Image (spheres, rainbow, N blue to C red):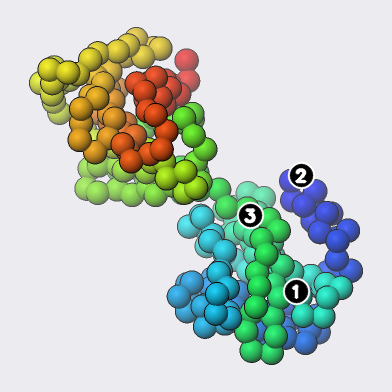
Amino acid sequence: MKRIIIMTTILMLFLSVETVMATPFKYENVVSNLIHTLVTKGEEEAKSFVASGVEIPEIREKTPITGFSSLNSPDENVRVAIGYFVSEENEPERIAFIWEVTSNKEKVTDIRVVYDGSNPFVDESKIIKEYQDKMKTPVLAPSEFPFDITHIRAYIDKDTLMLRYRNANLQEFVQIKVAPNITGLEKIKGEADKYYTLKNGTKALYQPNFLPAHQLIFQHKNLKYTIGISKTTKKDIKVEDLLKIANSMFLN
């Protein structure tokens, strides 16, 4: 439904829709080369097709781009490029981006983002599933944060899962580390640390003096979860922010 609404809106703004290969356009090769190079070779290679000072919009999801099409525009040197994410079997097609691209014979001179279809939480779910398969146990994931999330970096290092959530505009950063539960909370409790109880009765240890971040630790089944909010964030972090994240990891 979202895609239908988006495409209908675009159709109202532009004159006609055709595929890249079939549509005559004065500087089509410049736009086509930019998008093709971006999705096959990356941003650094694609920069050779843009004029000085023109930024290529960021695609905040690692899902591969399967292809793109384009729309005619009333303006002679403007093209609307539409990229599509690779879809899993039985999943609906997703639009990765819609850009209004202005160019001359040699370079792209402007790119305006009409629609950003990236969902960084797709990367999170994929890496969590990989870790669950590796460890043979379910993994809890947060659903609430004290600020909006624009980027997620997720990876596995041996038996440890690292989930890093950030807001690029506010310089705010949350990290969740998931690892096998080896040491009890009592053995790592410091003098200033304090116990809290999560909504499902799980005991959590708050460490306000941990050097790089405000930190909350709890154990669930055979895994230990360490939630940290960087002390470099602009927001005044309180223990309630960490508890909010931790509690959102439990459905009931």
Q: Front-most of 244 and 127?
A: 244
Tell which residue pokes out farthest to the bottom in this image. Answer: 105
- Residue at 62% over, 84% down: 107
Report whether residue 222 is seen: no
Residue identifier under label 3: 116
Q: Front-most of 150 and 180?
A: 150
- Mark 2 residue element: loop
Q: Is residue 139 left or right of residue 50?
A: left
User: Where in the figure is residue 138, as x and y percent of width and height?
Assistant: 36, 31
Crowdedness of circle 2 by 10 Å Cα count: few (<14), some, many (20+)? few
Q: CA distance from mark 2 to mark 1?
A: 25 Å
- Mark 1 residue element: strand
The kind of residue on which mark 3 rests is Asp
Residue identifier under label 2: 1
Q: Earlier in the sequence, mark 2 or mark 1?
A: 2
- Mark 3 residue element: strand
- Quarter-of-image position of residue 79: bottom right
Residue identifier under label 1: 79
**Looking at the image, residue 67 lies above or below residue 206:** below
- Residue at 52% over, 38% down: 148
Q: CA distance from mark 3 to mark 2?
A: 16 Å
Q: Earlier in the sequence, mark 1 or mark 3?
A: 1
Q: Are marks 2 and 1 in contact (CB under 8 Å)?
A: no
User: Where in the figure is residue 141, as x and y percent of width and height?
Assistant: 42, 32
